[in-house]
Amino acid sequence: MDQQQQQDNPIDMALQEYKEGIGNFTKKMPNIAKKYNAFTEACFEEGKLTQKEKQMIALGISVYSQDEYCIIYHAKGCLDQGCTEEEILETVGVTAAFGGGAAMSQAVTLVQECISTLGNNDSQLQ
């Protein structure tokens, strides 16, 4: 994917918006950002659960809460941790069992768009 295609892609654009937004927040509120980042990094460290499993949990929660930025971010996290499309779709399927139609609509649209767009691992947020 060339640079222009990445800029025109809504998934990559959302990742870039998040990256810029968190950068701006960090400049304005460094103490809060530092503590938040340390907390989330600790939560996603390898433990009894693998980082792959933690990304799948985070994706499910993101779909359930309909947080589109987190859906994109954690779909990428799942792919980065080696999740297959089937593992991701099974994760969001379980989420839809609890979240109903709203969760399923995110699963069949945004999550699948993330898989096809980010599956090549050329996205902007590294």
Image: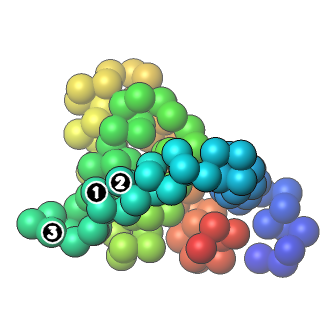
Q: Earlier in the sequence, mark 3 or mark 2?
A: 2
Q: Nearer the viewer, residue 108 or 81?
A: 81
Mark 2 and mark 1 in contact? Answer it, CB < 8 Å.
yes
Label 2 SS: helix
The residue shown at (48%, 30%) is: 66
Gap between marks 3 and 1, in whole Å? 9 Å
The residue lying furthest to the right in this view is 4
Which residue is found at the position 28% from the left and 36% from the top?
95
Q: Name the residue carrying label 2.
A: 39
Q: Quadrant location of residue 38?
A: bottom left
Type of amino acid under label 1: Cys
Looking at the image, which residue is at 23% across and 61% down? 53
Question: What residue is shown at x 84% (from left), y 61% (from top)?
Answer: 7
Provide the residue designation for mark 1: 43
Badge 3 marks a residue whose secondary structure is loop
Image quadrant in which the N terminus is located? bottom right
| Disc 3 target residue | 47
Q: Quadrant of residue 23?
A: bottom right
Q: In the displayed structure, does residue 89 sit left or right of residue 6? A: left
Image quadrant where one finds the C terminus:
bottom right
